[in-house]
Amino acid sequence: MLCPTVFGLLLACAVSLSSSAVILENGMPILWAHTTGQVTDLPTQNGVLTPDPWHYLHRMSLYRLAIAATDPFMGSMGTNATDSPLWGLPLQLGWMLTSGRLADPTGATTCGLQTGDTMCISSQSWWGCVNYFVSALPFLSAAQQGFIGPGVQVQMQTPAGVEDFCTTHADCTTRYPDAMAKWDAFFQGLKAATDSPLPDNEKKDSLLGLYWAAQMASTHASSACNARKSHYSSAEVSFADSWLNSAEYVSAAHFHSNLENSAMFISPLPSRVLQEGDSAPNIADLSAEENHTLSIFSWMKSINSLLGGTLVNMWQRAMCSVTTREKGREMLGQLLLNPGFATSTFLSIVTGMSTSC
């Protein structure tokens, strides 16, 4: 284990290499090489695994272990070693780290700051809190379903004085029954898919449906983090809300969140926490790509609000088959990554698709 100072230097070096969000390091998530690939490397107490999800490398290790354990069941996703949809989650966590979103937003501690423990994830961070629901919860479910090893029990560590996070499968099931039931269904679905007679494209679509149902249930459960938004600027809160809103679109399209696809969507996200006065597309120290993404996110949220929530509903209705979901994934890519793709075009296509189902 390298000392915190060395990790701080590695992180500072990675961030200094680009003005855009840094999410990859040698083709893998940030500091992936320093995570553990062995369950036996995690701390234990009385025979129970006790990882610390408030340490970046521990939380990232949960992803690494879950990906390795489920890879044998991911054949329908493709032939590459990074085709599992779970890869989008560690990339997202890496972006949160390098953009400063896991640090203590209150200023009361140096948790997550370059001047403190750079690997610390603050329990006061809204981003760190929301991510807990898509890191700790799925790992607890994977362990319960036998993916981490026979009879393995897990209890997450919590920071001193912090009691508003569930720590075991039973605890999380009691507090967030829908999220845990859907993660359990996803991991059970992986096992069942190995014997399924469905062609791979239908099997893939079905598994992605289970995966996104679980991730969205976790996202909805993470409303428990909302009080932490008060630590951020109105610009950052607006972006956070738009970021959550965007998940409704990618989930309905059964987005294949493998490493390659996720990197394209996460790299243009803002590379720092937004401050009062930041207004896309005119934020001087952010790249054109970051400004464009912020503008599109804001547009989608505004139009959906203006239409009384019907844009999301229309989109969800349009994503009614394997074929329309494939078309939907392509459209989202055009909207977010191609500045020449007009928002009016997106709106007219979605309106037409929703009436054809």
Image (tube, rainbow, N blue to C red):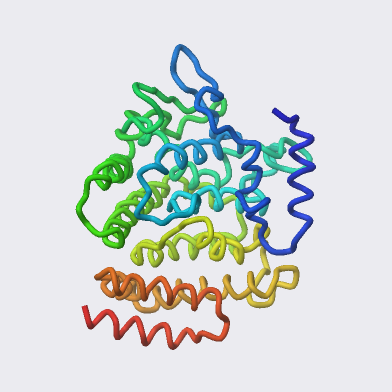
Is residue 36 depicted above or below 237 in this figure?
A: above
Residue in the foreground of this view, choosing between 145 and 8: 145
Q: Residue at x 50, y 62 (%)?
A: 261
Residue in the foreground of this view, choosing between 276 and 132: 132
Q: Residue at x 58, y 32 (%)?
A: 36
Figure label count: 0
Is residue 333 depicted above or below 69 in this figure?
A: below
Q: Quadrant of the C terminus?
A: bottom left
Q: Residue furthest front?
A: 79
Is residue 256 depicted above or below 210 in this figure?
A: below
Which x, y percent locates residue 59?
Answer: 54, 37
> In the visual, does 52 lie left or right of 20?
left
- The quarter of the picture where residue 292 lies is bottom right
Q: Residue at x 53, y 28 (%)?
A: 38
Residue in the foreground of this view, choosing between 244 and 189: 189
Which x, y percent locates residue 157?
Answer: 51, 26
Which x, y percent locates residue 145?
Answer: 31, 33
Which x, y percent locates residue 176?
Answer: 33, 40
Q: Residue at x 63, y 55 (%)?
A: 23
> In the visual, does 156 lie left or right of 284?
left
Is residue 314 depicted above or below 112 in this figure?
A: below
Q: Quadrant of the N terminus?
A: top right
> In the visual, does 285 lie left or right of 168?
right
> In the visual, does 222 lie left or right of 29?
left
